[in-house]
Amino acid sequence: MADITLAPLACRMGRAKRATGVMEIIPAIDLLQGSCVRLHQGDYDQVTRFSDDPLAQAQQWVKQGATRLHLVDLDGARSGEPINDQAVRLIAKELSIPVQLGGGVRSLERAEELLSCGLDRVILGTVAIENPELVMELASRHPHKIVVGIDARNGFVATRGWVEESNVEATALAQRFSSAGIAAIISTDIATDGTLAGPNLDALRAMAQASEVPVIASGGVGCMADLLSLLALEPLGVEGVIVGRALYDGRVDLHEAIQAMAEGRLQDPLSDQCRTIA
Ligand code: AMZ
């Protein structure tokens, strides 16, 4: 079990939270041995394989209106070594939208190599616990290009493909990196990830309150109503949501979801548009 001291670190301002009126829907491609898969609660023994052509899958999400793509190297997260680089590099090269990657990034050289091959953002999970100074260093060298991935089981951070548990509270970790110059925190609730059971709104609220940088929600989205339920957290700084299985299963239509969460959305009560018509 990892045990770190959460001493404050000297650092510069992070990317401030602000309510934008838009919540970005970010489709996820999780890579395992070159295929697009979804795991149930992050369990490598409960795999559903959706496609053997990650580039074609990524291009499909772009065609449906995605403005950003979330990639995870699941083999990398577990082993600490890049395993799915061929697909990652191809997607980064071919896509017209920003792509972010997490999983197995454990050194400065590796993070910089990924940024130089065209990735927009690099996500750091395990090193945020095991080597927080590296996060600070990378965020200072590449402002707003580094995202901290905080994956929590019962409120405590898990690492190394979620195989290892720590005694660090997710909210404490969020506070620690708030002013490091990172672009965002991705908050994943392991218990709901891949279950379609709905996001853990209480955990997300606590993370958004603890964090001074924008939070991206991850885990549990199973239908459009789940997405809409996240809008209540937007004023607290939840600016995006990662969607995986629900898109592959066809429970959520990406194009429709983007429209529903965009600016001037119909569900906003008494928007300016309505007032003008009235
Ligand atoms: O599903 C899993 N078992 C899993 C997963 N999706 N394990 C890690 N990850 C993701 C995290 C984060 O985006 O959500 O990998 C990234 C962290 O990787 P690392 O190697 O920095 O801890």
Image: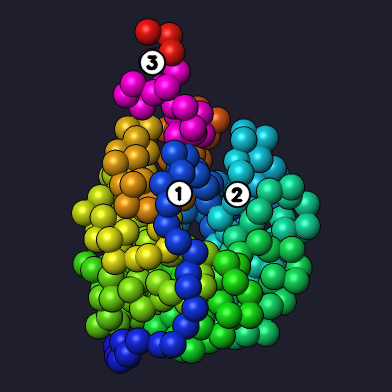
Of the two numbered discs 3 and 2 in the rendering, the one whose residue sits closer to the viewer = 3
Q: Closer to the N terminus: mark 1 or mark 2? A: 2
Q: Residue under circle 3?
A: 275
Residue 261 drawn in magenta:
yes
Relative to residue 105, is residue 99 depicted above or below? above
What is the C-alpha distance between the residues marked 3 and 2?
32 Å
Of the two numbered discs 1 and 3 in the rendering, the one whose residue sits closer to the viewer = 3
What is the C-alpha distance between the residues marked 1 and 3?
27 Å
Ligand 1 has an atom within 8 Å of the beta carbon of the residue at disc 3: no
Q: Closer to the N terminus: mark 1 or mark 3? A: 1
What is the C-alpha distance between the residues marked 1 and 2?
10 Å
Amino acid type of the residue that numbered disc 3 sits on in the rendered structure? Arg
Q: Closer to the N terminus: mark 3 or mark 2? A: 2
User: Is residue 22 something that shows in the picture?
Assistant: yes
Residue at screen point 69% across, 43% down:
59
Query: CB atoms at circles 1 and 2 under 8 Å apart?
Result: yes
Amino acid type of the residue that numbered disc 1 sits on in the rendered structure? Gly
Give the crowd class for mark 1: few <14, some 14-19, many >=20 residues within 10 Å.
many
Amino acid type of the residue that numbered disc 2 sits on in the rendered structure? Arg
Residue 180 drawn in magenta:
no
Q: Which residues are magenta?
A: 258-275
Query: CB atoms at circles 3 and 2 under 8 Å apart?
Result: no
Q: Secondary structure at mark 2?
A: loop
Q: Residue under circle 1?
A: 240
Residue 91: x, y in percent? 72, 55
Q: Residue under circle 2?
A: 68
